[in-house]
Image (cartoon, helix red, strand yellow):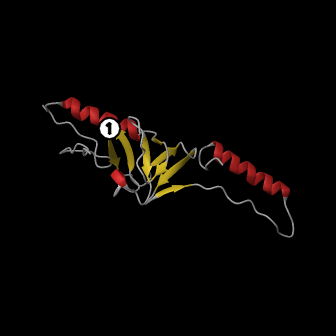
Amino acid sequence: MPDPIEFASASPRFALPLLHAGQAQKEVFVNEATMLTDLLLHCTVLGETATPAQNAQENDTWIVAPGATGEWAGHDAHIAVQRSGAWVFIPPRDGMRVFNRASGAGMLFFGYWRKGSIPVEPLGGSSVDGEARTAINDLVSALQALGILPME
């Protein structure tokens, strides 16, 4: 598996290559920066898994789940993208957000990938407040529509 291109001078957050005056082959640097920017800007992943997708298409993007195996071993929590028949791994940064198409909800990275979960509807008790339960269900539906909570 080819490693990503290493650049001598790169941006601090995502290692986007920086150009130098009079530099030869500028298109290599510009194209790599454009590809990474395209991937990371409003990032969408197909899902989260610990095993590489068998029939991945060019530019398919995944979150590498903990306990990754095969080509993904050692890249837990990274964003894996299929490029030119190989996997390229991008380490996430705190505050990074992605949209997970499998769950229909956003994920936030802060030390690990965080994702919302649907609260359990309260059951029982000595009195049932139907209006409060309706309001909670409406709130959950609104958060799902915004992609903050996963769809069921």
Q: Residue at x 84, y 60 (%)?
A: 129
Along the viewing direction, whichever of 42 and 117 lies nearer the viewer: 117
* Residue at the spot 28% in from the left edge and 36% down from the top edge: 32
- On the picture, is 106 further left or further right than 25? right
Query: How many tags in the picture?
Result: 1
Task: Give x and y (percent) for residue 8.
Answer: 17, 45
Decide which of 116, 58 is in the foreground and name it: 58
Estimate the x, y position of residue 58 in percent, counting from the top left: 38, 34
Left or right? Give the position of 38 relative to 31. Answer: right
Q: Is the N terminus in the top left, top right, bottom left or bottom right quadrant?
A: top left
The residue shown at (35%, 56%) is 73
Q: Is residue 109 left or right of residue 84?
A: right
Front-lying residue, 122 or 88: 88
- Residue 41 place in picture, x, y as percent: 42, 39
- Callout 1 amino acid: Gly
Is 112 located above or below residue 53 in the figure? below
Judged from the image, the secondary structure of the residue bearing numbered disc 1 is: loop
Residue furthest right as drawn: 127
Q: Position of residue 112 (x, y in %)?
A: 45, 59
What crowding class fits label 1: few (fewer than 14 Cα within 10 Å), some (14-19), or many (20 or more)? few
Above-or-below relation of 103 to 85 = below
Q: Is residue 76 left or right of residue 9?
A: right
Q: Residue 132 is drawn in which quadrant? A: bottom right
Circle 1 residue = 85
Q: Residue at x 24, y 40 (%)?
A: 17
Residue reaching furthest front? 54
